[in-house]
Image (cartoon, rainbow, N blue to C red):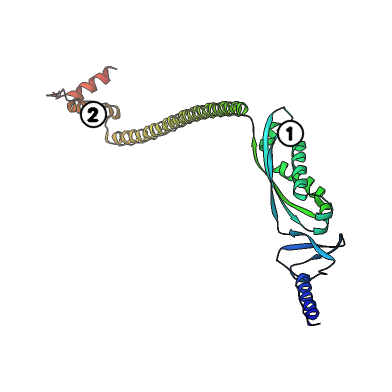
């Protein structure tokens, strides 16, 4: 009798331990009873029927990364390229992820590869190389819609590398080099053109300024001569009035004045050593005037 009690006690302890399940954080466990879905265990302490229930699968519900293997794709312009990528996904419903698809990661991988082939097959090589964001967005939309029935959320898709064949890479390198040289030639020509235009504009501006300066100088010279003539006229008028009052001859005075200025200039000349003045040069001038 004692053996039976001990055996039953041990069996009870075993069943209790077997029925207690501690689920780690970020995990969900699917429980089956008699081969049929029973429940989903959440993180923490859980109890199950140790005799008729079992843990069918354990899911990590954190965001996970799935590498897409490299595959060959033919673009719209018949260029063969090697493409690989990465898919980020998260399991939202363990029931659908387990019972909705046989192999979740394999299904996501195959779906991503076939969808990627379909998307890039409608694009040229240049568009494929320059439109990665568009490829990522289109692929994300397709995968997210398809995996909804599998209880999975596709959070992000990234194309890691698009690798053209070696001969095509060389051709592209030559094309890029030619394009850079063409752009450099165009920029140099534009710079020379701009420099010539600026030079011509500067020369034109200098000519205009020089002409304006000459015009202004001529106007100032004319104004100065006019003022000088007016001053001389006033001076001659004053001299004439004064000489008439005193009985003198204004013409003789003016001629004599110019005669004296001429002699002074002659005396200031570097080649002049001695200047002789006639004693009766005024009488001589008067006699000339009387003859006239």
The residue located at (67%, 32%) in the rendering is: 81
Q: Residue furthest top?
A: 291
The mark that comes first in sequence, 1 or 2, is 1
Q: Residue furthest left?
A: 274
| Residue 248 placement (x, y as % from top left) | 26, 31
The residue located at (75%, 59%) in the rendering is: 59
| Residue 270 placement (x, y as % from top left) | 17, 25
Circle 1 — which element? Answer: loop
Is residue 93 in view?
no
Which quadrant of the view contains residue 135? top right
Residue 123 tag number: 1
Mark 1 to mark 2 CA distance (whole Å): 100 Å
| Structural crowding at the residue carrying mark 1, measured as other residues with C-alpha within 10 Å and reported as few (<14), some (14–19) or many (≥20) | some
- Observer-nearest of 165 and 194: 165
Circle 2 — which element? Answer: helix
> Up-down: is 274 above or below 1?
above
Residue 261 tag number: 2
Which quadrant of the view contains residue 231? top left
- Observer-nearest of 267 and 193: 193
Which quadrant of the view contains residue 115? top right
Q: Is residue 221 left or right of residue 194?
A: left
Q: Is residue 61 left or right of residue 230?
A: right
> Up-down: is 94 above or below 67?
below
């Amino acid at each position: 009798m004692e053996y039976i009690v001990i055996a039953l006690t041990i069996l009870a302890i075993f069943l209790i331990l077997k029925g207690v399940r501690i689920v780690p954080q970020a995990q969900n466990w699917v429980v089956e009873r008699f081969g049929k879905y029973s429940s989903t265990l959440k993180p923490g302490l859980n109890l199950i029927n140790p005799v008729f229930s079992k843990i069918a699968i354990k899911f990590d519900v954190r965001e996970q990364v799935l590498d897409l293997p490299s595959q060959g794709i033919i673009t719209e312009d018949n260029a063969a390229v090697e493409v690989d990528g990465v898919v980020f996904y998260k399991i939202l419903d363990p029931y659908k992820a387990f019972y909705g698809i046989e192999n979740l990661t394999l299904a996501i991988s195959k779906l991503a590869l076939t969808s990627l082939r379909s998307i890039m097959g409608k694009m040229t090589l240049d568009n494929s190389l320059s439109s990665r964001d568009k490829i990522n967005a289109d692929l994300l939309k397709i995968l997210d819609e398809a995996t909804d029935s599998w209880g999975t959320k596709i959070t992000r898709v990234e194309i890691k590398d698009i690798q053209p064949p070696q001969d095509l890479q060389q051709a592209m390198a030559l094309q890029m080099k030619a394009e850079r040289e063409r752009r450099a030639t165009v920029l140099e020509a534009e710079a020379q053109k701009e420099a010539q235009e600026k030079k011509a504009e500067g020369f034109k501006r200098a000519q205009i300024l020089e002409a304006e300066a000459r015009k202004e100088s001529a106007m100032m010279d004319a104004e100065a001569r006019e003022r000088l003539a007016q001053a001389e006229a006033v001076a001659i008028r004053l001299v004439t009035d004064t000489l008439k009052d005193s009985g003198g001859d204004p013409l003789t005075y003016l001629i004599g004045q110019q005669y004296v200025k001429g002699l002074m200039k002659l005396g200031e000349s570097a080649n002049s050593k001695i200047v002789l003045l006639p004693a009766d040069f005024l009488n001589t001038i008067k006699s000339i005037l009387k003859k006239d």
